[in-house]
Structures are given as structure tokens and as C-alpha cells.
Image: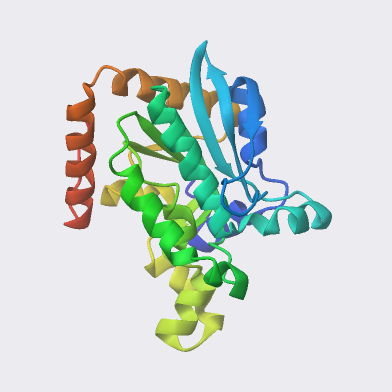
Amino acid sequence: MSNKLDEWDRVLEARKVQRPKALDYIENIFDDFMELHGDRLYGDDRAIIGGIGFLQGMPVTVIGEQKGKSTKENMERNFGMPNPEGYRKALRLMKQAEKFNRPIITFIDTPGAYPGIGAEERGQGEAIARNLLEMSTLKVPIICVVIGEGSSGGALAIGVGDRILMLENSIYSILSPEGFASILYKDSSLYKKAAKEMKITAKDLKELGIIDEIIKEDNIFENTKKSIVKNLEKLLKIEKDKLLETRYQKYMKIGKGENYDFK
């Protein structure tokens, strides 16, 4: 990983409009992807894309937070900020994956869950909490990949996995550096200081044991695919009951600030 970029530089890299989005990864890594729509309760949230594809011949469920590459597309995708129905769609597809014994791959890239009035009225907090609970008990391997901006509960709602991978110029945090600076320093102009203090880069999070692996971006799709395949091969060898126990222990150790060596 290059040492030339500081923490704020990484934030800017993660937010670049031209940076590959979830659909780019899906198109370049998986074969015969078929998108599935709707949460069967309210509607179809285009900020979350999900469906079934093949990874080296194996059927997998793929879910990603989708930003746009233009103003028009960002409006259609709500700038990658999911509503409750997006998270409920994701959960529906994850439960379907468990039923048919398909591994789950998620791509995280969001500034956060949408904070609008309608989203709150439809249970945004409950939808996120439900996903955290359900993902912790799914009896299939889960690999989560942070590909850009992973912020707040909006990222965590599809981020509970057996392996957490990060692109080297992505970020993963409880909120934006600007928001952090406004709350803690009472001055949003101190966002660069906040970015450094928050430990949001892949390098920092790997050292803290929050994530498991950093993916280099020199050949971004090939490297991401290799990392997913390598980790999935290891996870598929683990018995289902052991998989759940290992996932539980992983997050217990993270909660205590300890590094966890996945075996």
C-alpha cells in the first residue's frame, strides 16, 4: 500500500465518483448474475442491488450498496443511501441464500443509511438492527468487502461476516470525518484531524483487528476476486455449527479490542 496518501486523501479516494461501484464488481467477478427485486413489504430500493450469480461455477448470493456515476444515476440510487426496504430486501435474499445453502458476498459502499422522515417512519433503525441480528446467525459463509465509503449503521447492516475485506483506498467508520468533527470538536472544519483520529483506513483497521485483509488496487477486480475465492474456500471447509461459533468469537474479540486469527 502506498504511504504517500494520508487519511484524508484516502477519504477523497473512497468518495471519487469514478471509483468502481458494486455493479462493476458484480459484472467483473461473477457470471450470469440475475438481479432480484423488492422486500415483499413495501418496495424496491435501488440503493441496494442483490441477486444470484456464479463464482467459478458455484452459485452465490451477491448484495451491494450501489452509488451512481452521474448526478442522474445518483438520484436514482439515492446516492447509495439505502432506505429500510433496501435492508429488508438484502435480508430476504440472505435468508433465501441460507435456505438453498448459498454463500453470501456483500459489497459495502455508502455514506450511511438514508436519514429521511419516510425512512424513519418505515423503521430504519429496526431494519438495520434486524440485519445485524440475522446475519450473526446465518448458517452459510459470509464475506463482506468494503469497496469505497463504509459509514455508520448503513454499512454495518450488510457488514456482519466471517471475513471482512477492504480495498486499500476504502474507508470504514462510524460516521463521516466531517460529522465526527462537528460532534466532538464542535468545528466541522477539523475534518482532517478527525480522519486521522478515527482510524478509518484499511491499514489502521487491519492493525486493530477490525478487518481481515487489505486488497491492493493495482488490478482491482482480479485482486478482489482472488481474495474472495481464497477466503471462501477456507470458509466452506468449516462445519456450520463451528462457523457460527467462530463468527461469534470473532466479534466478541473485536468488541474487546483484540485481534482475531480466523482458522
Residue at 18 percent of width and 28 percent of height: 241
- Left of 159 or right of it: where is 88? right
Can residue 200 be spotted in the picture?
no
- Left of 30 or right of it: where is 229? left
Q: Is residue 174 above or below residue 47?
A: below
Q: Is residue 164 above or below residue 82?
A: above
Outermost residue to the right = 72
* Render colour scheme: rainbow
Spot occupied by residue 10 in the image (x, y as percentages of width and height): 54, 55
| Residue nearer the viewer, 182 or 26 | 26
Q: Is residue 86 above or below residue 58?
A: below
Residue at 56 percent of width and 35 percent of height: 217
Can residue 18 be spotted in the picture?
yes
Residue at 45 percent of width and 58 percent of height: 127
Quadrant of residue 180 in the image? bottom left
Outermost residue to the bottom = 186
Outermost residue to the front = 41
Q: Quadrant of the C terminus?
A: top left
Spot occupied by residue 257 in the image (x, y as percentages of width and height): 19, 56
Spot occupied by residue 47 in the image (x, y as percentages of width and height): 64, 51
| Residue nearer the viewer, 51 or 8 | 51
Spot occupied by residue 124 in the image (x, y as percentages of width and height): 49, 64
Question: Number of callouts in the render?
Answer: 0
| Residue nearer the viewer, 111 or 89 | 89
